[in-house]
Image: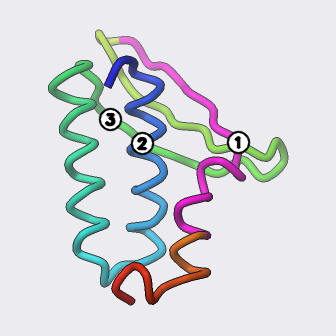
């Protein structure tokens, strides 16, 4: 991945899928994989995501280089993968 922003987005999208599908081992493994990339490639720790309904976005807070930072992603974009899986579960092993 080329940037922290890209890695955070990838982590967020699969993190949302894993949270919505507790039985989906592949989603949980993939979320862990992207978290490991954030840690090893970008030095990111303490990653947390929260939905900001009022502003229509997800706020991802994290620590990098000892500094607390935030990234913002539109809800529609962040939830696209999860919505696709829910719309066509037969394509995703559900």
Q: Where is residue 68 in the image (x, y as percent from the top left)?
A: 44, 19
Q: How crowded is mark 1: few (under 14 residues within 10 Å), some or many (20 or more)?
A: some
Please tell me whether residue 71 is drawn above or below residue 64 in the rendered image: below
Task: Tell whether label 3 touches label 2 (CB within 8 Å).
Answer: no
The residue where tag 3 is placed is 46
Asked whether residue 85 is drawn in magenta, I would say no
The residues tagged by marks 2 and 1 sit, at their Cα atoms, a distance apart of 13 Å
- Quadrant of the rendered structure where residue 86 is? bottom right
Please tell me whether residue 1 is drawn above or below residue 15 in the rendered image: above
The residue range painted magenta reads 67-83
Please tell me whether residue 31 is drawn above or below residue 3 in the rendered image: below
Query: Viewer-proximal residue, 39 or 27?
Result: 27
Residue at (41% x, 56% y) in the render: 14
Q: SS of the residue at dot 2?
A: helix
The residue where tag 2 is placed is 10
Q: Position of residue 2 (x, y in %)?
A: 35, 18
Where residue 74 is drawn, which disc sits there?
A: 1
Horizontal arrangement in the rendering, residue 11 relative to residue 13 (left or right)? left
Q: SS of the residue at dot 1?
A: strand
């Amino acid at each position: 991945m080329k940037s922290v922003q890209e890695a955070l987005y990838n982590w967020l999208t699969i993190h949302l899928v894993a949270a919505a599908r507790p039985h989906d081992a592949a989603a949980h493994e993939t979320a862990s994989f992207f978290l490991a990339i954030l840690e090893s490639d970008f030095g990111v720790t303490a990653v947390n995501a929260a939905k900001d309904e009022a502003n229509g976005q997800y706020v991802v807070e994290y620590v990098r280089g000892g500094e607390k930072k935030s990234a913002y992603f539109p809800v529609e974009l962040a939830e696209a993968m999860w919505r696709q899986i829910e719309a066509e579960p037969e394509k995703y092993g559900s």
